[in-house]
Image (spheres, rainbow, N blue to C red):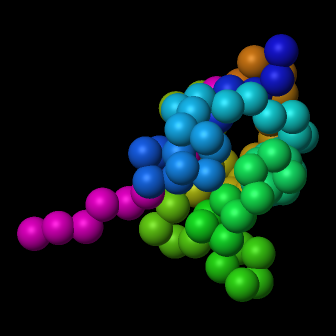
C-alpha cells in the first residue's frame, strides 16, 4: 500500500509532474531519503546542508504538523498520507 505523499507544485518538476507519489519509510526522515532515491534532487529542496528539514517547509502526517509530533522522527505506517507544504510569506 505504501505512504501517499502530496507534492507541492514547485517540486512537481522533480516528480515528473506527479502531484501524489508513493513511498516506503518508517519515519519522516526515512521518507525524505526514499523520496531522494526515487526523485533525485528533492532532498536538497527539503533539507539544509546538515540534513535537517528546512524551516520554511511544513510537513503534515495525516493532517498533523510534525512540529507538534516528533519532527523528522515522526513514525509512519502503510496508508498514512503526508503533505509537504512550503511556507508562504507575504504582506
Instruction: State yes or no: residue 86 in magenta.
Output: yes
Nearest the viewer among 12 and 55 is: 12
Res 7 quadrant in image? top right
Q: How many marks?
A: 0
Vertical relation: 43 (above or below) 65:
below
In percent of width and height, residue 29 lies at 80, 56
In percent of width and height, residue 43 lies at 71, 64
Res 46 quadrant in image? bottom right
Please indicate whether residue 27 sits to the left or right of residue 18 in the image.
Answer: right
Quarter containing the N terminus: top right
Q: Is residue 31 visible?
A: yes
Quarter containing the C terminus: bottom left
What residue lies at 51% left-to-right and 61% top-to-bottom? 57
Nearest the viewer among 45 and 83 is: 45
What residue lies at 57% left-to-right and 33% top-to-bottom? 18
Please indicate whether residue 9 sits to the left or right of residue 53 in the image.
Answer: left
In percent of width and height, residue 49 lies at 72, 84
Vertical relation: 75 (above or below) 32:
above
Instruction: State yes or no: residue 41 in magenta.
Output: no
In percent of width and height, residue 11 lies at 52, 52
What residue lies at 70% left-to-right and 64% top-to-bottom? 41
Nearest the viewer among 85 and 42 is: 42
Please indicate whether residue 30 sits to the left or right of residue 28 in the image.
Answer: right
Q: Is residue 68 visible?
A: no
Q: Which residues are magenta?
A: 81-91
What residue lies at 67% left-to-right and 71% top-to-bottom? 44
Vertical relation: 82 (above or below) 56:
above
Query: Which residue is outermost to the left?
Result: 91
Amino acid at each position: 500500500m505504501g505512504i501517499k505523499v502530496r507534492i507541492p507544485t514547485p517540486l512537481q518538476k522533480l516528480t515528473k509532474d506527479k502531484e501524489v507519489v508513493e513511498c516506503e519509510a518508517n519515519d519522516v526522515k526515512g521518507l525524505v531519503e526514499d523520496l531522494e532515491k526515487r526523485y533525485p534532487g528533492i532532498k536538497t529542496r527539503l533539507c539544509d546542508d546538515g540534513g535537517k528539514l528546512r524551516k520554511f517547509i511544513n510537513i503534515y502526517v495525516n493532517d498533523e504538523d510534525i512540529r507538534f509530533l516528533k519532527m523528522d522522527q515522526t513514525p509512519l505506517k502503510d496508508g498514512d498520507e503526508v503533505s509537504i507544504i512550503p511556507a508562504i510569506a507575504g504582506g
